[in-house]
Amino acid sequence: MKYCENCRVSVRTGRETCPLCQAPLKGESEHLFPEIKSVYNQFILFFKILLTATISGAIASVAINLMLPESGLWCHYVVLGVICFWILLITAIRRRTSIPRGIVNQVFWICVFSGIWDALTAWHSWSIDFVIPCTCMIAILALGVLGKVLHLPPSDYLGCILADAVFGIVPLIFYLTGVSQFVYLSLSCVAVSIIALVTIFTFHGKQIRSDLARRFHV
Amino acid sequence: MNQIRTKWNKLDNAAKLFPTASTRAETHVFRFSCELTEPIEPERLQAALDETARCFPTFGYVLRRGVFWYYLEESRLHPEVMPEQRPLCARLYRPRAKTLLYAVSYYGCTINLEVYHVLTDGTGAMHFLRTLVMKYLARAYDIPEENLGYETAHTSMADDSFRRYSHRAPIKRTERPNAYQLRGAKLSESRTGLIRGTMSSRALLDAAHEKKVTLTAYLSACIIAAIGEDMPLRARKKPVVLDIPVNLRNYFASDSVRNFFTPIYVSYDFSRRDGTLDDILAVVTETFARELDRDKLAEHFCAFLALEENPIARITPLHLKDIVMRTVYHNTIKGYSATLSNIGIVRMPAAFAPYIRSFHVCNATNKLQACVCSFGDRLSISVTSCFTDTAVQRRLFRRLRELDSDLVIETNLLDDDA
Ligand SMILES: [Zn+2]
């Protein structure tokens, strides 16, 4: 036990000075609390470097594009690419604690971005023909396999499959309205989604209903 | 096939604000610790924790986001004891993460229980820690376990007592002026600095009884005096307001281990009054007499319940609610300068007492907070703060030192922190 003559109190600590008045302490050290290491780590440094690098890249490409106008307008692709990359990365990191929810989130953003890119690059409908149906199908299968392999509690991934399967029916609209030109993947995606929905409701109907009641309680 | 229905609970009235308002700096995590006479054995502590967790099923719940409200859902997560390696009262809940809302750690002779306030209040957490310590000591010294004198039926433990005692009350808007706020440099990484003093309860009780007031009233006055002493002159326009959570179990019968408290506020205006301890005590006693009344307390929490039951509030999506509730929370915290919570006397069966040195409570805060509890004749006053400056603590503990020359100071602050 140490002692502060200024405050006239005993202090149980490993400190050199009194925590109340900063006067030097006399006596024997005692450790009641561990020394906690800084939580700021190199991870954050890595992100700072990445952020600086991508932003400088985008700025540089705008500058170069303006210097060489004869090469056509292309710098907005770089800027958009950087924005897409960061949104995907940030959402992935924010949802890293729940793999199934992370997958649903990434599916959503990938579909949205592919649509935007397709529209900006003279609309070849590759987004709705290939990217959206493939992403949805892969996500549904991945969620089902992950859930079983990792023995996740059903409430953790069934709702996510449900969300993905509902989203996976959207290509049906593209098919019916005739927007999609290559229909095989769209139709497979719709089929897989409906099968997934039917399976979930027959095997886990009760679970899904109680999940929804919980999630939507007012 | 797993068809077992998942158990879940709505958040209780007091917990509703915490998830939206919790950040890295303001974690709403509190810590109960128990210092034993001998170093902790991790395996034994783990075994005791496994058993304790089974007695307190609501502690195993995780916080989830619904579409309209947050809710607590049962989980199969297993609590694991860890050597203490995280900052004091660091965040336990991260949005969307499925993690337990409490943690047990150890360092030297001390067992720490950290709890996110959404799960329970001081009473519930203290039941948990007492059970854990009893089970640990029972294993270590071969003492038969005893009943710790709280209701163990799982349904009464999970009771939402706010709802049980609520009645339709007209909402009275009480406008409270903004309180004086402590300012200054903050500790790095939003850490919480703790300075606690342990002293003889007898000495403090004698001093309080001499002034014919309760221990809580006496300590409230000491804290208000310590804050008021070096207020800059132009800051004296604003009153020093102390926020004191009241355990409603003392006024309404309840065995719940979930939240069941409501705050009362003691306000002292240094610009109009003389600031002597006797005068502050008079204001504190008068406020306590007025506020600590069953009907008055009920009025307070019924007003909050009415807000929560408003149909428009109920169907507002959670994302919007988050924004509104954050504003409500920030307006509430502008209304007080510091917090004092008195957990009261911690009782352990006589057979276990010789192996226990002391119990302590402390709370994360973005202001200054004092938490008090006593065990035997040792009273522990833990003052946590986010500031590097310790002037308020110095004045408080120097005053208390005059009552008991054996006052011992303990701290988690390092030499280069302050
Ligand atoms: Zn000192």
Image: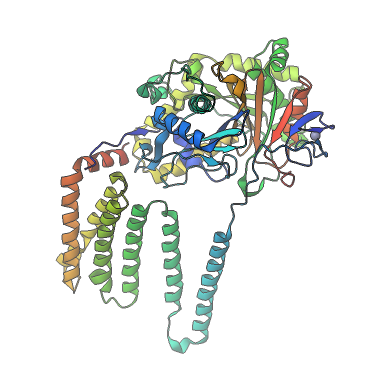
Q: Where is residue B394 in the image (x, y as percent from the top left)?
A: 76, 32
Q: Position of residue A38 (x, y in %)?
A: 62, 52
In front: A19, or B384?
A19
In front: B158, or B152?
B152
Report the side of A21 relative to A35 (left or right).
Answer: right
Q: Where is residue A29 in the image (x, y as percent from the top left)?
A: 75, 38
- Residue A70 position by quadrant: bottom left
Instruction: Establish if B417 lies above or below B266.
Output: below
Q: Position of residue B254 (x, y in %)?
A: 43, 18
- At x 33%, y 69%, the residue is A114
- At x 34%, y 57%, the residue is A103
- At x 24%, y 41%, the residue is B2
The C terminus of chain A, quarter of image: top left
| Residue B388 appears in the rendering | yes
Q: Report ligand 1 position as a quadrant.
A: top right
Instruction: Establish if B418 lies above or below A46.
Output: above
